[in-house]
Every structure is written in C-alpha cells, then in structure tokens.
Image: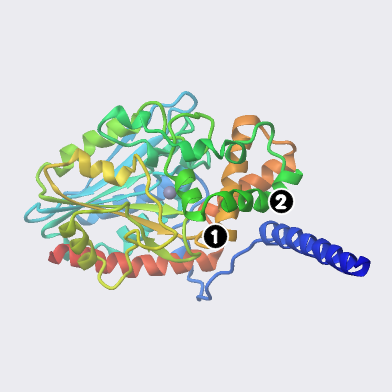
C-alpha cells in the first residue's frame, strides 16, 4: 500500500511539473513560423517605419495617381488631439469615369498600429492593382489612417484608449451595452500595477487562462473578451463613453462622396487575428442573403468566414457595419480583411495574443516595472500587428494583390 501511494505521489508530481513546464515553454518561447516564400524587395518598399513616413508614401502614390488621372482628389482632415496637432486622416478619391454606380472604400489604420500594413496594402493597390480601365463605373476612395493617434504612437487604440472598431454606431445607446462576461474576467484582463514580464503570474499566464477556460468554454471566453465593453476606460477592448472625433469627420466625407453612387463596398484592413501569413475575409455576421451572395461573387473562390467556424466572434460598434448604417439608402457590402500574425486560431496563439494585449495596456496605463519590460512588451506588440519578417510581408502583399485584383474586377462586373 505504501509503495502504491509513493508511485501515485511521484506520478502526480511528474504530471504537475510536466504541465507547468509545458505551459511555461509554450507561452514564453512561442514563435510561429512563416510560410516559405521568396522575398520580394519590390513588395517590401511599401512598408515604412513611422506614421509620418507611411503617410508620406501614401501621399506620394496618391499624387502619382493624380498625375495620371485628372479627376483624382486628395485631401486631409485633422483629427483633434491634446498632444499632437499633426494627426491626419488622408483621403484619395478616384471618381468613376463614366457612370458613378459603385464605390469602393478601402480603409486602413482603424486600429492605429495595424495601419503600417494597411498603408502598405493601399500603396500597393494604387501602384500595382488600380487600372484606369476598371474605373468606368467604379469609384475608389482610399482612407489612410482612420486612427492616426494609434498609428503614430503604436497602439491599436485612440488617444482616449478607445478601440475605434467598438466605437462606431448611429445611436449612442451602444454605450449602455453591458458585457457581464468581461466583468467576470477583470482580474485577468486588466491587472493593476506596473507591467512586469518577470512576475509569476505573467510567466504562467497560460495557466491563468486555462483555469478560466475550464470554467467557461474557449468560445465563450473569446466572445466576452473581444466583443467590446463600455464600462472600464482603462481596460482592454474599451469602446468608449462617447463617439471618437473622427467618426463625424469620416461620416461627412462618406456621405458627400457616396452621394452619386448606388452601391458602396468597404474593405477595412486589419492585422493580428488568424493564421499567420494568411489573409482572412472576416465580416461580422450578415443576415441579408443578397449581401452574402454578392460578397461571395466578388471574392470568388476565397473563403469567407461567415461565423460558422469556432474561432468566430461578434463585435459591437464595428466601423465597417457603421458605414452601412450611415449610408442606409445604398446597397452596402461590408468586409474586414484581416492578416493573421500569431496563429490566434490555436489556443496557444490566442493566449499569447491576449497576453501581449494585456501587458501593453497595463504598461500604458500604469507604467513598466523596468526599461527591459517596456522594450520587450512594446516590441512584442509591434510584432503582433506589424511583423518585421520579410517573408510574412512578401506573402501577404502577394496574396493581397491576387485577392484585390480579382475583387475589383468582379465588383466592376456586378
Ligand atoms: Zn484590427
């Protein structure tokens, strides 16, 4: 009997050490691999290292377009800020040549820091995809840096810590939406005190999340965290207490440019969610059968995540859905194009992504324990939304070119 107890004890100890070791290593040494592609310098040229450089490169491509097509209009709108008076949303409008029936709005930087990649895709589109032939009945509006503050200061959020993609609606009843699932997770999502990557809780963050997953399913947890919340202004996924100033600015431009068009199609560019190096078509749920079938025709052969896979979630206050509500007299087609970076469809990838977001927010709100913590956390955050890997960048630019070429052709042919 004694021997039996001894064996059981050893088995339990080995199991505990094994689980601790596995969860420690899988989280702290997590590094998803790139798909092998040949690096293409002509694609890397679209990536810049700052908001100002990206904006400059966008304006450069826009000016090149204007030199080719007389009717092109370029304009900027300043987004008010307490700290910086040079934060702009830049627009490049290429009107339809003959009959203004269909408008495509291609938006970047809704989540500021994701604008690096969004800007690169827009520059490539202007330089390599856009063709005068396709403009007979299609107009295109490029919108650069929907959230310029976040772009400039490397955050997804606005100056008010607001996730703009949870902040958009035509009625302010959105700010009374409750998210009780989020409130159950407050200690995990918004820990107090300075961000310290060396703390026990952070080293074993995986266990903290697994513990929650044992109480609630992964899908319930994902939904509670990502849908947005309107209560905790220093918390992650905060949708605001009020509309952010750019909403009115964008609304005015969209109303005026779309006035002549019957159909409006928005592609909102994002990064950070999904399989690494893959472009995901990822709308909020759509009920309307005609909208769904039209989007399927436009993205011919490319898989659209309609909400039936288990990594799906629904968000409140989505920017692309808002445009449809604003332009309710148009036939409206919403789409988010999301470039995956950390394989967040897997459990480890999801936990890693969440951990990076939690630490970055904690550091911004309460400071960092050390300079090393600050560097490490900010670097992980940047890599999550703007990977420096040349293979990743080449791959998503190659894929975007294929998808966007097909998309614009099919849209013109509708
Ligand atoms: Zn995003």
Q: Is label 2's Cβ within 8 Å of ligand 1?
A: no
Which residue: 9% across, 52% down? 100
Q: Quadrant of residue 85?
A: top left
Image quadrant where one finds the C terminus: bottom left
The picture places residue 316, in percent across and down from the top left corner, at 36, 41
Of mark 2 and mark 1, the one earlier in the sequence is 2
Which residue: 21% across, 60% down? 292
Which residue: 11% across, 55% down? 97
Measure the alpha-carbon separation of dots 2 and 1. 19 Å
Which residue: 28% across, 36% down? 250
Which element carries disc 2, helix, strand or loop? Answer: loop
Outermost right residue: 2
Left or right, 329 with reference to 72: left
Write down the residue under mark 1. 342
Outermost front residue: 1
The picture places residue 188, in percent across and down from the top left corner, at 61, 41
The picture places residue 278, in percent across and down from the top left corner, at 44, 66
Left or right, 191 with reference to 259: right
From the viewer's perspective, is the residue at label 2 or at label 1 nearer? 2
Write down the residue under mark 2. 204
- Residues 163 and 222: in front is 222
The picture places residue 259, in percent across and down from the top left corner, at 12, 41
């Amino acid at each position: 009997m004694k021997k039996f107890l001894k064996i059981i004890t050893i088995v339990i100890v080995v199991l505990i050490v094994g689980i601790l070791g596995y969860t420690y290593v899988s989280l702290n040494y997590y590094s998803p691999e790139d798909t092998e592609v040949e690096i293409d310098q002509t694609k890397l040229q679209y990536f810049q290292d700052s908001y100002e450089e990206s904006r400059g490169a966008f304006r450069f491509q826009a000016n090149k377009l204007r030199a080719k097509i007389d009717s092109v209009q370029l304009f900027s709108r300043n987004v008010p800020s307490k700290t910086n008076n040079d934060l702009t949303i830049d627009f490049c409008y290429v009107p339809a040549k003959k009959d203004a029936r269909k408008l495509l709005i291609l938006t970047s930087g809704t989540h500021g820091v994701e604008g690096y990649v969004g800007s690169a895709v827009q520059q490539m589109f202007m330089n390599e995809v856009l063709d005068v032939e396709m403009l007979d009945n299609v107009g295109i509006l490029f919108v650069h840096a929907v959230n310029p503050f976040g772009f400039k200061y490397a955050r997804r959020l606005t100056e008010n810590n607001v996730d703009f993609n949870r902040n958009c609606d035509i009625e302010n009843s959105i700010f009374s939406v409750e998210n009780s699932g989020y409130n159950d997770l407050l200690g995990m999502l918004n820990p107090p005190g300075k961000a310290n990557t060396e703390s026990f809780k952070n080293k074993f963050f995986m266990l903290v999340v697994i513990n929650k997953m044992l109480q609630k399913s992964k899908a319930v947890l994902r939904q509670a965290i990502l849908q947005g919340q309107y209560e905790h202004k220093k918390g992650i996924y905060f949708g605001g207490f009020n509309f952010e100033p750019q909403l009115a600015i964008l609304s005015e431009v969209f109303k005026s440019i779309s006035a002549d068009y019957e159909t409006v199609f928005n592609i909102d560019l994002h990064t950070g969610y999904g399989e690494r190096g893959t472009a995901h078509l990822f709308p909020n749920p759509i009920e309307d059968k005609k909208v769904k079938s039209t989007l399927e025709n436009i993205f011919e052969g490319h898989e659209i995540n309609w909400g039936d896979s288990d990594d799906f979630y629904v968000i409140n206050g989505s920017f692309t859905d808002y445009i449809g509500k604003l332009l309710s007299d148009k036939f409206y087609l919403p789409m988010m194009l999301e470039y995956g970076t950390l394989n967040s469809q897997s459990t480890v990838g999801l936990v890693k992504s969440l951990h990076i977001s939690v630490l970055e927010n904690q550091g911004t709100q309460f400071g960092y324990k050390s300079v090393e913590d600050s560097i490490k956390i900010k670097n992980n955050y940047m890599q999550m939304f703007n990977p420096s890997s040349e293979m990743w960048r080449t791959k998503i630019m190659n894929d975007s070119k294929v998808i966007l070429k097909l998309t614009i052709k099919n849209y013109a042919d509708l």
